[in-house]
Image (cartoon, helix red, strand yellow):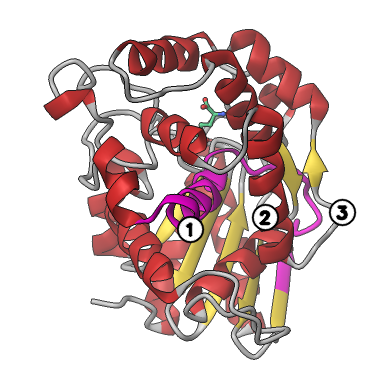
Amino acid sequence: MKSILKSIIEDSRDSTKLGQVATYIPELAKGDRDALGACIFDVNCDSILEGEYKTKFTIQSVSKVVILICALIDNGKDEVFSKVGSEPSSDPFNSLLKLEINENHKPLNPFINAGAIVCTSLVSGDNGIEKFSRIHNMMKKLANNDDIDVNYSVYNSEKLTGNTNRAIAYYLKGANIIEKDVEDILDAYFKCCSIEVVVEDVAKIASVIANNGVAPWSNERVIPEEVNRIVKAIMTTCGLYDTSGTFSVNVGIPAKSGVGGCIMAVVPNRMGIAVVGPALDKHGNSVGGVKVMEDLSRKLSLSIF
Ligand code: DON
């Protein structure tokens, strides 16, 4: 498998030239456009690292998976889905378009920004600091790494420029979907996006989800079975925004992308995979990451369909 991953990464390098690093958060523009690295971490704790696997990147929207896990554990499925839908959106990740026309103004799903901001507001804690701490601790546990922390340059950059997210959050407050202080919730959301990781951290998070919510290294149940099932379903239908259908056709496994260039993917009962390639397509997905996932799926027969 190591030689397969190595050759896929080498074959995919040219594809990164077709993408651009995110610039709407100025600090992300410093990402290495040419980098491409991956980690496969399986449910027996065997791991493979290839390419620029030491590249550090901010987890960005991949954190929405952990936010959803915490929101579901802390509130239960019915409460969460009374405030956010579970339908794919055919709009970009930061779109406000449907908020006005959706039933009760609910965001379509937990993985568009609007839905993730609602889920952040639902996580246990009296304020943004406590909510962030809950999500951060869950991320450390899922990655089996106590050292992962916020990149404060990216966080400050997000906070300074996150006006579309501010517009989304204030609209949701006006619609009574968010009940607490908007800036406080946004602060927790920006911090979650700005957590700095390497592919091994993300592959380990994915391996817990692949292992039905049980950490492969300790056999401890971290995610309740029902929550884990829901998270895999939403990853499959909504994980790559308006390209989730194409990703299902070409790769066929639950996944989540982020504008830091990461794609996290779950092969149920087998392995977690993380690829980083900061050059993005126009949908905000890593170009190299999608190509690596397509080739891996074909060569290793990963599709669940
Ligand atoms: O909300 C934002 O703009 C970012 N912090 C996260 C967006 C993101 O990663 C979208 N994913 N492709």
- Image position of 30 (left or right of 17): right
Crowd band around label 3 with a 10 angstrom C-alpha radius: few (<14), some (14–19), many (20+) = few
> Residue 147 shows which numbered tag?
3
Q: Is residue 144 above or below residue 237?
A: below
The residue wearing badge 1 is 73
Mark 3 in CB contact with mark 1 (< 8 angstroms): no
Residue 53 on the magenta segment: yes
Q: Is mark 3 on a helix, strand or loop?
A: loop
The answer to whether residue 15 shows anywhere in this view is: no
Q: What element carries label 1?
A: helix
The residue wearing badge 2 is 139
Q: Which residue lies furthest to the right in this view?
A: 147
| Residue depicted at x 62% and y 38% | 125
Q: Residue furthest bottom?
A: 44
Spot occupied by residue 45 in the image (x, y as percentages of width and height) = 69, 85
Label 2 to label 1: alpha-carbon separation? 14 Å
Q: What stretch is highlighted in magenta?
A: 49-76
The answer to whether residue 139 shows anywhere in this view is: yes
Label 2 vs 1, first from the N-terminus: 1
Q: Which amino acid does label 1 sit on?
A: Ile
Label 2 vs 3, first from the N-terminus: 2
Q: Which amino acid does label 3 sit on?
A: Asp
Crowd band around label 1 with a 10 angstrom C-alpha radius: few (<14), some (14–19), many (20+) = some
Quarter that holds the N terminus? bottom right
Q: What residue type is labelled 2?
A: Met
2 vs 1, front mark: 1
| Residue depicted at x 65% and y 84% | 216
The reply to whether the residue tagged 3 has its Cβ within 8 angstroms of ligand 1 is no
Q: Which residue lies furthest to the front in this view?
A: 126
| Residue depicted at x 27% and y 52% | 78
Front-most of 300 and 227? 227
The reply to whether the residue tagged 1 has its Cβ within 8 angstroms of ligand 1 is no
